[in-house]
């Protein structure tokens, strides 16, 4: 265990904050509930963004940008939407300050005619815009994504997992038919699943939310759910079928091939910097951050070790050749040749930062044509021959990526249970945690009772039909088992 990191077993919440700090990912800002994302954290988000952005473009989407400020009246046009976000909105009421006695205060004469909402999500401003873009079936579909920041006035915050301001992407699409919109919603759910598992090495379940957990203004909300090392679930991404609700609210219609005017069908979908929190809690350990190679901004770091200027020269020449060889192969590599830090400090720093592979080279390695390779995920090191090092490292990075996923998948399996009755369910939730499959009668009353009794919620209803049974609480018929867990 790193000396500055609390063990997971002792205090999981503090462990998480310690890892964020020691990996130099983020820190609290002077604005309560907001965070400063440090270069290491931003580099990680940029790699996520790059991978997702390409996946969006591969499925026909384009990027655009919409205003940060939304007229208050827009939110009131869709009743469920405003009800869902009313308590989280930051409101701009004035347009300027004035100097008073060496300080500043709000100029009362600058009050806005209509207050502006700082973007909590963009459905309303976007659908007001789409009204101007859509007249005919020829204008459809619109497949647009936005990379932006949003503000939701959270009182209980935790870096990356829940902050007042965070970064995200939000897709907003418009379609001529319900079938196209549903297909789009499920397609983007699959994009998120693929990204989570193939890039983040984080296994997820996919399904649909209950009506009580549905996005405000949606007809259906689909989600990916991951399980963290402490047995709590994390909603890692959502894709919403919005039906025609926003088209009705903003009067967005199109003329079809038969000359009939019809309302447009809509979707929205998004993931955020919350994914960084999920990544931390899926793979990291008591030494610090552990990163899957596909997302690590630095996949390999070379640490040269020497004690004299003569040794420094020959070791750095040796290290440079390895660096150039790996860089030509597209490996994201760093040579840590700082003279003002000793090798032990560098090793600890790179471990805490989660760099997947470390190469150490010293005079003896140069003499014997070797290198010392250390895998971050296993905290093990081996001496290997310098010849063919590039192929070895490429294979090792692939192995790390795959083994991180397999390890997380195995842990999820060990932390997943089935409950045959309510007492068994409550015992599992309280003492073991993790995911629990159990029958539910489909009523909001039973869903709320379970939440009140156990603090566990229905994370999703599987998309595939399951075996029918009886609700563990009411004994009423149940169409299939659903997935429960306590969550972040």
Image (cartoon, rainbow, N blue to C red):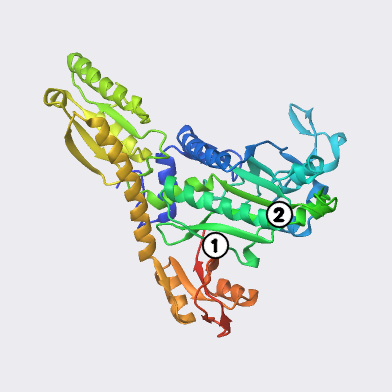
Between 107 and 193, which is closer to the camera in this rendering?
193
Q: Neighbour class for label 2 at 10 Å: few (<14), some, many (≥20)? A: some
Question: Where does residue 165 sit, x and y in percent of width and height?
Answer: 61, 43
Between 418 and 161, which is closer to the camera in this rendering?
418
Question: Where does residue 363 sit, x and y in percent of width and height?
Answer: 15, 23
Earlier sequence position, callout 1 versus callout 2: 2
Judged from the image, the secondary structure of the residue bearing numbered disc 1 is: strand
Question: Where does residue 15 sit, x and y in percent of width and height?
Answer: 40, 50
Q: Is residue 319 left or right of residue 111?
A: left
Q: Is residue 407 left or right of residue 212?
A: left
| Residue on which disc 2 sits | 85
Residue 162 shows up from this direction: yes
Disc 1 to disc 2, how far (Cα)? 23 Å
106 shown above or below 209: above
212 shown above or below 116: below
- Which residue is at 21% across, 40% downward? 381
- Which residue is at 70% across, 56% downward? 242
Of all residues, the one furthest to the front in this rendering is 258
Between 380 and 246, which is closer to the camera in this rendering?
246
| Residue on which disc 1 sits | 207
Do the CB atoms of the residues marked 1 and 2 lie less than 8 Å apart?
A: no
Residue 2 shows up from this direction: no
Judged from the image, the secondary structure of the residue bearing numbered disc 2 is: helix
Query: Mark 1, mark 2: which one is toward the viewer?
Result: 1
- Which residue is at 49% across, 77% downward? 467
Question: Where does residue 310 sit, x and y in percent of width and height?
Answer: 18, 14
387 shown above or below 425: above
Q: Neighbour class for label 1 at 10 Å: few (<14), some, many (≥20)? A: many
Q: Is residue 86 left or right of residue 183?
A: right
Q: Is residue 376 left or right of residue 193?
A: left
Q: Which mark is residue 191?
A: none
- Which residue is at 20% across, 33% downward? 372
């Amino acid at each position: 265990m790193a000396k500055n990191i609390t063990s997971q077993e002792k205090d999981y919440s503090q462990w998480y904050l310690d890892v964020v700090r020691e990996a130099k990912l983020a820190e609290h800002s002077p604005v309560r509930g907001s965070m400063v994302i440090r270069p290491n954290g931003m580099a990680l988000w940029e790699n996520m963004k790059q991978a997702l952005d390409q996946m969006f473009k591969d499925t026909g989407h384009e990027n655009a940008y919409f205003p940060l400020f939304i007229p208050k009246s827009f939110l009131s046009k869709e009743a469920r939407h405003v009800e869902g976000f009313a308590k989280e909105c930051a409101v701009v009421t004035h347009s300027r300050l004035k100097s008073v006695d060496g300080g500043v205060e709000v100029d009362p004469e600058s009050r806005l005619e209509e207050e502006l909402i700082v973007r909590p999500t963009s459905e309303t401003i976007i659908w007001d815009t789409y009204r101007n873009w859509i007249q005919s079936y020829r204008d459809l579909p619109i497949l647009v994504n936005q990379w932006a920041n949003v503000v939701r006035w959270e009182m209980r915050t935790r870096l990356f997992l829940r902050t007042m301001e965070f970064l995200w992407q939000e897709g907003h699409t418009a379609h001529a038919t319900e079938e196209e919109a549903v297909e789009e919603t499920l397609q983007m759910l699959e994009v998120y699943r693929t990204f989570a598992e193939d890039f983040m090495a984080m296994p997820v379940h996919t399904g649909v939310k209950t009506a009580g957990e549905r996005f405000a203004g949606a007809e259906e909300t689909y989600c990916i759910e991951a399980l963290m090392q402490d047995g709590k679930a994390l909603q890692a991404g959502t894709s919403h079928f919005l039906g025609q609700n926003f088209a009705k609210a903003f009067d967005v219609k199109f003329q079809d091939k038969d000359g009939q005017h019809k309302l447009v069908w809509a979707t929205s979908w998004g993931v955020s910097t919350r994914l960084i929190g999920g990544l931390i809690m899926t793979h990291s350990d008591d030494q610090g951050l552990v990163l899957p190679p596909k997302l690590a901004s630095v996949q390999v770091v070379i640490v040269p070790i020497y004690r004299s200027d003569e040794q420094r020269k020959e070791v750095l020449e040796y290290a440079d050749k390895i660096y150039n060889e790996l860089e030509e192969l597209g490996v994201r590599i760093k040579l840590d040749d700082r003279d003002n830090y000793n090798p032990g400090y560098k090793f600890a720093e790179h471990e805490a930062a989660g760099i997947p592979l470390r190469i150490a080279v010293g005079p003896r390695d140069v003499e014997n044509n070797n290198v010392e390779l250390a895998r971050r995920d296993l905290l093990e090191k081996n001496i290997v021959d310098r010849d063919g090092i590039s192929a070895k490292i490429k294979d090792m990075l692939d192995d790390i990526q795959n083994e991180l996923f397999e390890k997380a998948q195995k842990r999820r399996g060990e932390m997943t249970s089935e409950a045959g009755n309510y007492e068994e369910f409550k015992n599992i939730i309280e003492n073991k945690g993790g995911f629990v499959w159990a029958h539910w009668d489909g009523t909001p009353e039973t869903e709320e009772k379970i939440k009140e009794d156990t603090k566990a919620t229905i994370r999703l209803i599987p998309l595939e039909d399951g075996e029918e049974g009886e609700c563990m609480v009411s004994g009423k018929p149940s169409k299939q088992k659903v997935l429960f867990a306590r969550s972040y």
